C-alpha cells in the first residue's frame, strides 16, 4: 500500500441536486487519507450515466460545482486531486480509468446493508470485485477513516501475501491491531478418505489438518512487520468470516475477491460476494497478480 501512486475514486451524484452521496464523500476522504501518506495522485471520477442505464446524461452546473468542492476537500486532507467525467456505466468507467491510468487502487462508496436489498448482485460493487484490474476498496460511509482494527482473511494463496502486507501497513498507520483469520476444514478428498475411520482415527486426522493450518498461519504472520492476533476457525469461509466480523467489528475487512479456478470477470458466488451483502464494514479486496481484466 505504501507504494501506491495512482488512485481512482468513484463519485456518485444525486440526479436532481448534484450533491455527492455520503458513501462517495467518505471514499474520497479515505483516498485522501491514503494519498497523504504515499504521495499518490487521486482521480475523482463521476460517470454521467442514467440510473436506468439508458445512456449518458448532461452534467448540471450544480454538479460541477459540487465535484470541485469535493476536490478541494480532498486536497485539504493533504492529497493532490483531479476531476474526470466519463460517459459510461460507473463500474465500467472505473475499470477503464484504472487501466488507462495504471491505478493501483480503486475506491467506491459502499451501501449499507439496509439500503442494498435484492439489487446487490447487479451492483457496481460486485462488478468491480469481478472485473476491476486493481484492488477495490468499498468504503462504509459510517466508519472512521483510521484503521485501528484490521481483519485480514487468508487462504494461503499467493494473493494472501499481498493482502496481509497491505493489512499490516494499514494497521501500523493508525497504531492499530491486525487480526488474521483462516477458515479451515478437511478437503473433500480427506473427508471421503476418513469415512471408514474409527472415531479416534477421525479425530486424529482432524487434529492433523488443524495443526497444518495453524503452522501455515503462523508462517505468514512471522514475516509481517506487526504482531497479529491469529484466528483459526473450522467451517465454511464465508460463514466464519461473517461470524468473526460480528465478534470483532473491524474498521476494515481485507480479503481476496476471486475464488480459485474462476474465469476472469465471471466468477459468481465467490466468498467476497457472499460476504459483501451481509457485512457493514468497509471491504478491501485483492486479486491475484495474474488476473486478466475482461474490460478492454
Image (cartoon, rainbow, N blue to C red):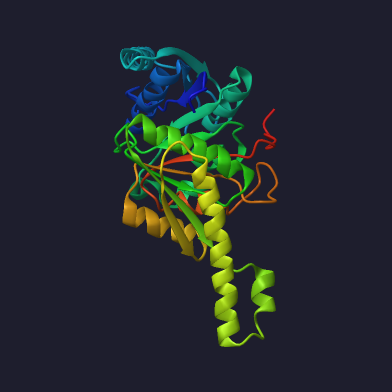
Foreground pick, 124 / 169: 169
Residue 216 lies in what quarter of the image?
bottom right
Residue 290 lies in what quarter of the image?
top right
Foreground pick, 199 / 12: 199
Query: Vertical placement of 272 versus 203: above or below?
Result: above
Query: Vertical placement of 215 versus 265: above or below?
Result: below
Quadrant of image for the C terminus = top right
Q: Position of residue 217 (x, y in %)?
A: 52, 53
Q: Is residue 88 left or right of residue 150?
A: right
Q: Residue at x 45, y 15 (%)?
A: 39
- Can see residue 139? yes
Q: Is residue 66 left or right of residue 201?
A: left
Query: Vertical placement of 43 versus 128: above or below?
Result: above
Q: Position of residue 134 (x, y in %)?
A: 58, 31
Q: Residue at x 59, y 50 (%)?
A: 156
Query: Vertical placement of 68 versus 97: above or below?
Result: above
Q: Residue at x 39, y 56 (%)?
A: 244
Q: Position of residue 173 (x, y in %)?
A: 36, 29
Amino acid at each position: 500500500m505504501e507504494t501506491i501512486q495512482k488512485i481512482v475514486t468513484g463519485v456518485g451524484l444525486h440526479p436532481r441536486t448534484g450533491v455527492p452521496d455520503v458513501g462517495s464523500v467518505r471514499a474520497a476522504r479515505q483516498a485522501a487519507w491514503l494519498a497523504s501518506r504515499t504521495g499518490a495522485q487521486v482521480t475523482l471520477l463521476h460517470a454521467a450515466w442514467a440510473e436506468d442505464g439508458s445512456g449518458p446524461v448532461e452534467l448540471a452546473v450544480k454538479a460541477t460545482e459540487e465535484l470541485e468542492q469535493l476536490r478541494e476537500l480532498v486536497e485539504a486532507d493533504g492529497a493532490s486531486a483531479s476531476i474526470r467525467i466519463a460517459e459510461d456505466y460507473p463500474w465500467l468507467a472505473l475499470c477503464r480509468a484504472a487501466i488507462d491510468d495504471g491505478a493501483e487502487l480503486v475506491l467506491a462508496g459502499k451501501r449499507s446493508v439496509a439500503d442494498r436489498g435484492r439489487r446487490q448482485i447487479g451492483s457496481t460493487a460486485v462488478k468491480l470485485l469481478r472485473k476491476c484490474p486493481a484492488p477495490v476498496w468499498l468504503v462504509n460511509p459510517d466508519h472512521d477513516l483510521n484503521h485501528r482494527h484490521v481483519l485480514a482473511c487468508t487462504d494461503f494463496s499467493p494473493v494472501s501475501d499481498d493482502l496481509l502486507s497491505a493489512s499490516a501497513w494499514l494497521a501500523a498507520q493508525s497504531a492499530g491491531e491486525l487480526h488474521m483469520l483462516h477458515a479451515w476444514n478437511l478437503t473433500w478428498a480427506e473427508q471421503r478418505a476418513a469415512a471408514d475411520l474409527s472415531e479416534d482415527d477421525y479425530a486424529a486426522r482432524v487434529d492433523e489438518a488443524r495443526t497444518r493450518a495453524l503452522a501455515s498461519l503462523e508462517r505468514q504472520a512471522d514475516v509481517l512487520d506487526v504482531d497479529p492476533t491469529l484466528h483459526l476457525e473450522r467451517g465454511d469461509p464465508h460463514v466464519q468470516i461473517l461470524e468473526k466480523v460480528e465478534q470483532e467489528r473491524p474498521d476494515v475487512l481485507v480479503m481476496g475477491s476471486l475464488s480459485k479456478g474462476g474465469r476472469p470477470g465471471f466468477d459468481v458466488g465467490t466468498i467476497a460476494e457472499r460476504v459483501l451483502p451481509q457485512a457493514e464494514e468497509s471491504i478491501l479486496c485483492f486479486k491475484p497478480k495474474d488476473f486478466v481484466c475482461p474490460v478492454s
